[in-house]
Image: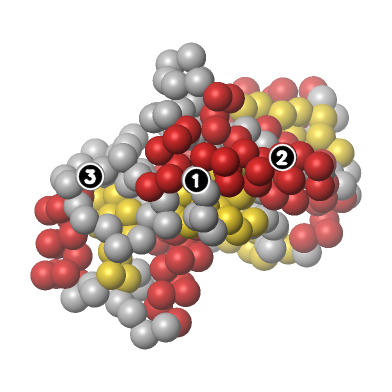
Amino acid sequence: TAGGTGKTPFCAWAAELLRSEGWRPAILSRGYGRNEGTGLDDENRLLEALVPGVPVVVNPDRCEGARTATDRFGADVAILDDGFQHRRLARDVDVMLVDALLPLGGGHMLPRGMLREPPDQLRRADAIVVTRSDCADTERLAHIESMLDDLARDVPIACAAHRPTTLRRLRPRGVREQVDLEQVRDGRWGAFCGIGNPSAFRLTLRQMGADLGLFRAFPDHYQYDVDVLRSTVEQARRAGCSALVTTDKDAVKVSGFLHALPRMPV
C-alpha cells in the first residue's frame, strides 16, 4: 500500500539486525520528496539518525544506487525502503508490511484506495509483517491473519508493534534533550505530524495517556515553514496546551525553525 505502514522504522531495525550479524548493509531509496540541497528526504534523514554509520543511497535508479553502495561504501547487502513493485533489481528476500489499522489499503487500488497492485500479489512475498498489531484487538488480528493466509498461503506471518522509547525536547541547532517518557502524561499537549498514517500517531499518544488539546495532521512528507509552525503554536495555546509533540520523522524538519517560533516546548 501507499503510505504509512511503518517501512522506515522497519528498515532501521533490519539494518541494525544485519549489522549485528556481521553484514555491511546499505539502504537504497528513491528519495521521494527529497530536498534539492541535501539530496535527502525526511525518511532518509531519520534513517541516518536511527542507524548511524549505515549509508543511505538516494537514487531513483535502484540498480545504480546498488552499484554506488557496493563501490563507494563496500556494502554487501542492500535494503530497499519501498521496493516491492521494483522489478529491475533482483531481490533475495521480499518482506511485505501490512498495517493492522488499515490492512490492504481499504481494499481498493489507487486512486480510490491505497493499494498499488491487487491483493493477490501478496503471494510474491517471502514474509509478511503485520505492523501496529498491538492496535488491533484479538478478533480483528485473527481476521487479518486469516485474510492474509488466504491471499498468500504458506507465506510466514509475523506481528510487530511500534512502541515509543524516548521523549526528546528539541533545541535550536538540532540538539535534543532526552526527558522522561512519562512526562507525556503531564499537562495538555498539542500534537502535529506529516506522516503516512497520522491516526496511528494519535492513537499512540492516547495509549500513552496524553491529554490532547490539539491534533494537526499534514500530508505525508510535508515541508514545514515558519508560518505554519507559528500558527500551530498559536492554535495550541488557544487550546490550553503547554507543549507540542511530533514524530521523529517530523522533528528532523522542524528543528531548524525553533529559533523563530514563540516559546513553547516541542
Q: Are marks 2 and 1 in contact (CB under 8 Å)?
A: no
Q: What scheme was used to colour the molecule? A: secondary structure
| Observer-nearest of 81 and 169 | 81
* Residue 84 x, y percent position in the rendering: 35, 45
Who's the residue at 60% across and 58% down the image? 158
Q: Is residue 21 above or below residue 137?
A: below
Residue at x 40%, y 38% (from the top left corner) = 121
Among numbered discs 1 and 3, the one appearing first in the sequence: 3
Proximity of marks 1 and 3: CB atoms separated by less than 8 Å:
no
Residue 152: mark: 1
Residue 175 image position (x, y, % from top left): 53, 60
**Crowd rating for badge 1 (residues with CA inside 10 Å; few <14, some 14–19, many 20+):** many
Q: Residue flagged by tag 1: what amino acid is it? A: Ala
Q: Position of residue 73 (x, y in %)?
A: 20, 72
**Quick check: 225 above or below 75?**
above
Give the Cα distance between marks 2 and 3.
Answer: 30 Å
* Residue named by callout 3: 87
Regarding residue 182, the answer to whether it shows in the image is: yes
